[in-house]
Amino acid sequence: MNTSIKTRIDSLRAEMKNSGISATIIPQTDPHQSEYISDHWQVRRWLSGFTGSAGTLVITLSEALLWTDSRYFIQAAQQLSGTDIILMKDGLPDTPSIVQYLIDHLSNEEIVGIDSMVFSTTETTSMRNTLSTAGISLIDTFSPIDKIWVDRPQLPDGEIFEHEEEYAGEKTASKIKRVLENAKKQGADSTFISALDEIAWTLNIRGNDVAFNPVATSFLFLAAKNSTLFIDNKKINEKTLEYLNNNSIQIAPYNSVISFLQALPSTQKVLINPTGTADRFASVLGSRAIKGQSAVAIPKACKNETQLAGIRKAMERDGAALVKLYMEIERRMTKGETLTEIEVGELAAKFRAQGELYFDDSFNPIAGYGAHGAIVHYSATDESNATLQPDNLFLFDSGAQYLDGTTDITRTISLGNPTKEQRHDFTLVMKGHIALGTAIFPAGTRGAQLDALARQFLWKEGLSYLHGTGHGIGHFLNVHEGPQSIRLNENPTPLTVGMITSNEPGLYRESKYGIRCENLVLTIPAFSTEFGEFLKFETLTLFPFDLSLFETEIMTDEEITWLNNYHQEVYNRISPRLNDAEKAWLKAKTAPLTR
């Protein structure tokens, strides 16, 4: 029994009883609706012990349950062991939604309590309406965490800095003008922005408040007059204060945002994104709120030419660093020297840091040897840290934050002699990867319409993977970025010229190995016909795939040609950054694949 987790949940239940609450829901987010959050907002992790980046905890007076998706099924089962918390495998047909579970297990007139600072207005409205059909009430001011989490970490206080125009490619004033024009098109004369990456992009500022995501804890109100950044003063130095003043941005304390919104005139029309804004702010704004699409999301997602030039150079530096890394992995395997999963991640950061404009990793690396590779978002710990052996597959998913771009790459390699099954599985994944990467599609196509291209070869053999195939990528920003995606779930945002998205199909055999093959791709114009404009992808990532894992018998000539052309480009663009030994290694890894 994990007594610390039990004690924390018992303390929460005591507060629930005092407030007449029968159930409470604790999401993995913050008042900014962030996917990646600072330690101060890691409430769900503190209460459950589960460290995954996605998952929601539900506590009733008699049960504790955690919903998470397929990326974390294995990890969650391990971390919840001994806590009495029940794992709910979200997305499976027999797993009810959280709201349906509550309806099934609570009685008429019972109360569900949430903190509307960590739920969007869309989520809160939907929950309230659905629960009310069963006579269950929703109270949105239940927030006892500060009382029971006595040593809760403080909000981060690192200083912000300017992301200079030579990397951003657009002045802050120009961005603000575009954002307000987008708000005006939706009937608003101002906009309230709570998403940290949207604030960072709009103001060309960056910070270090969230691990691996260069953002700063803040809120932003934009209007023709009185534009205000709500941020702790200790995060502002003289240089950034002058920079913000020059862009007509006032500074106010972070915790003053609600009183500011309350004081706005009743005639003010404030655009908010209901899926990305905490419901508390929508409630405060009341009739002043105009609910619509984010005025920032699309401009941020469609990279400009300066950003694209930067990410192409960043990919070359990233590829050169990975050459050094994989050469070192091979050297140690050949010499019988020990190398652990954690050490691989440390080596990757070391080699990347030797290149220009490196800032940080873009996420905690996923280094999965053998069975650990089947845990989709595995993160090695001191207890789980495996030593690599020359007898299985090794999956390494990693990335970096450079001042001129963000990278995210996964490669699966064989550390010994791959089995027939491993080669067959790998090739099926790569066939899907190539099919998606070479797709041509009409403008207006959504990611859900392309997702099956990556899965088709797996599906034909009764195989699949449960995670999405692609997510958006920020520019020296969050490694997971909306609004676009490539996944089975419907997403109304079309893939648009300038968007950078991952292409990462996979296959995971529990207790054996995992395979994922990931490149980043850029949506670019293809051609126009009498049927309209057509688009395609440019592959940005530059690093070879393991030639030993291809089963050429099931590949088409076109697939082999694509691979060889890709490998030739990898060599041409990375080799100028390498010494002679590294060039020779890369030459062998990019040799033409033949039948």
Image: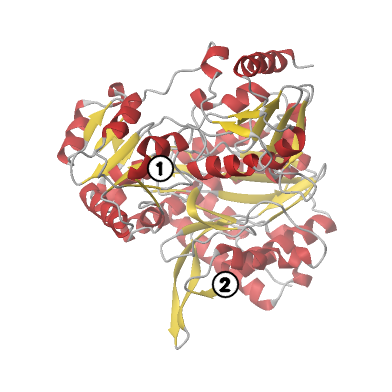
122 to the left or right of 2: left
Give the quadrant of residue 567. bottom right
For numbered disc 2, what is the local secondary structure? loop
Q: Do we see residue 333 in this rendering?
A: no
Question: For the residues marked 1 and 2, what is the alpha-carbon distance in whole angstroms?
Answer: 29 Å
Q: Is residue 2 left or right of residue 143?
A: right
In the image, taking residue 166 as reference, residue 16 lies left or right, namely right
Residue visible at 24% across and 30% down? 251
Q: What x and y, as percent, mark residue 285? A: 36, 38
What residue is at 78 percent from the left and 26 percent from the top? 81
Pick whichever, 36 or 13, lies toward us.
Answer: 13
Residue tagged 2? 439
Q: Is residue 343 above or below residue 453?
A: above
**What label does residue 146 carry, if any?**
none
Horizontal placement of 242 versus 120: left or right? left
SS assignment at label 1: helix
Q: In the rendering, at what x and y percent does residue 161 appear?
A: 29, 34
Observer-nearest of 549 and 506: 506
The residue under label 2 is which amino acid type? Ala
| Residue on which the image places disc 1 | 197
Q: In which quadrant will I find the N terminus?
A: top right
